Amino acid sequence: MPAVLNVYALPRYADPRQLAGGTAVVIDVLRATTTIVYALQAGATEIIPCGTVEETAARAGQFPREKIVLGGERGGRPLPGFDLGNSPEEYTADRVAGKTILFTTTNGTQALLHAQPAARILPAAFVNASAVLQRLLDEEQIHILCAGTDGQFSEDDILLAGLLVSRLENSGKQYVLNAQAQTARENWLHAFALPYALGAEPLPAEHLARELRKSRGAQNLLPLGYAADILAAALLDKFACVPEADPATLRIHLPQTENN
Ligand code: MLT
């Protein structure tokens, strides 16, 4: 039987009942899931997504202050009283190694919360795309949730969804795609058909960044001075790790073998 491969351009398009028993891939390229990958790769013990700033503050009270880092944004900007914003490269080993990160963002952490009914939840970004792809090859029910930006779809997320769809199909396994998966794949092929035809592999970060800059997410970030974050998000396969969120608690960690 062919495997199921669905893309949802926004979390609200995914009926939570459909996610049950499947694998949810949660994408917020600019910037939440990219930042999650950087933070875990820098040695953070775990990341706890929080829905609101108030919830973040309440949960912070359950930990010794020196054990946690408060991170996230609203409107792209760092939050008052928080330690870090939502720039991937802020999450360096000296700031986050050995720490629990309480993390709240406008769209990305909401998408993670929406994915909770799934049996397996994998935050994904371009920086760990091939590692996620490998992990997905054995899955029979894949639901890719794009976080979007301020309730609207954002091309940065759709592009990564399209890369995953295209490469899963190229693996030779049979998939049934929903309409949004087909559209995402076409977007990806349209954006990158020429460089691939010319043999551009691996994809140059600047080329991917050029596409990401056109997205709704980037249009919010550029006026705030976060151009470097877009480049950091475009470093395809910089890392080989696959973070996973525990569906019961949503705590995100790297499987033991990848965390050193
Ligand atoms: C979000 O979760 O809304 C985004 O990551 C926004 C941002 O880029 O800060």
Image: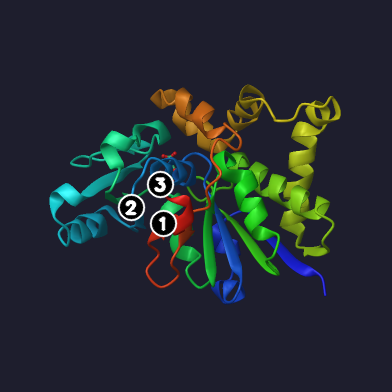
Residue 225 image point, x, y percent: 41, 22
* Circle 2 residue: 45
Dot 3 alpha-carbon crowd within 10 angstroms: few under 14, some 14 to 19, many 20 or more: many
Quadrant of the rendered image containing residue 256:
bottom left
Q: Label 1 near label 2: C-beta < 8 Å?
A: yes
Q: Label 3 near label 1: C-beta < 8 Å?
A: yes
Residue 173 image point, x, y percent: 82, 61
Q: Is residue 80 visible?
A: yes
Residue 114 image point, x, y percent: 48, 64
Badge 3 element = helix
Residue 109 image point, x, y percent: 42, 54
Q: Is residue 7 visible?
A: no
Between disc 1 and disc 3, whose residue precedes?
3
Q: Amino acid at mark 2?
A: Thr
Answer above or below: position of 190 versus 19.
above
Mark number displayed over residue 40: 3
Q: CA distance from mark 3 to mark 2?
A: 7 Å
Quadrant of the rendered image containing residue 206:
top right
Q: Amino acid at mark 1?
A: His
Answer above or below: position of 163 versus 194.
below
Closer to us: 235 or 178: 235
Badge 1 element = strand
Answer left or right for 260 relative to 143: left
